[in-house]
Image (tube, rainbow, N blue to C red):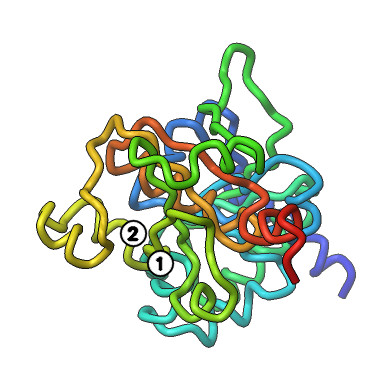
Amino acid sequence: MRKTILFFILTSLLYWERLSCKNFVEVEDDPNTLIVDLRECDEIENSERVCGNVNIPLKTLRNVFKTMSSDQFLKHFGLPKPGYDSAIIFFHYSPKKSFQASSIMENMGYKNLHVYDGTNNDQGITKRPMSVVGYEDVVQVEGDPEVLIVDVRDRHEVANSGRIRGSVNIPLAELELAFSRMSETEFKKNYGRSKPGRDFPIVFSCQAGVRSTQAMRIMQRIGYKNLYNYSGGWQDYKARKGWK
């Protein structure tokens, strides 16, 4: 029995492609590839922001892909739910957890699975930097017509808790549609602000930095350049203001 399990693990490690940093950078913005950061929220908060398109902690992975409909996945993560043949890359500091994720997904019928642990960094290859701003930066530009602050939380979250002064609420699930397909007239009608050009400074905020990072990835992919991520989000803003 132990030999059978060991054989399965070894053959799985050979089957699931382990990506180099160069390979990872090449597909990082590919709309046909889903990059899943498997870390817990507290692990992300204590290090860099989300590596990839979506943050789905390992312990919730099976439930997310098994129970979420395509519409629910799109609404929650702002990206289409991948099909069984779609390329999926898993990231975690512990390669063991990435391989566990691949095993879970393979058992559910997914086939095009890859692992990137972030440690096999080819010399001279670096990830594109993400501009992160803090509370002091946001306070300086809130209400400034020359900067657009976009809150990507769901509408009910904003309605129940409030938002940064002068910010516009565009839920993550609507983001790509709003910026890539809406006319300037539609955008202003829906959000009360002129649709910004691709070089206009845009700051993204959410509850605690996870969805705003996903928003950055989406906007980079559709060609926007002057983007900033308020990594502390509403949670940090509210605490700094002394609000409860």
One can see residue 8 in this view: no
SS at badge 2:
helix
Residue placed under numbered mark 1 in the picture: 171
Q: Nearer the viewer, residue 149 or 40?
A: 149
On the image, the x and y values in percent for residue 115 come to 62, 48
Amino acid carrying mark 2 in the image: Leu
Res. 243 image quadrant? bottom right
Amino acid carrying mark 1 in the image: Pro
Q: Nearer the viewer, residue 146 or 236?
A: 146
Residue 131 is left or right of residue 92, and the answer is: left
Contact (CB < 8 A) between labels 2 and 1?
A: yes
Residue 30 is left or right of residue 116, and the answer is: left
Q: Nearer the viewer, residue 179 or 220?
A: 179
Res. 171 image quadrant? bottom left
On the image, the x and y values in percent for residue 113 come to 53, 56
**Residue 175, numbered label:** 2
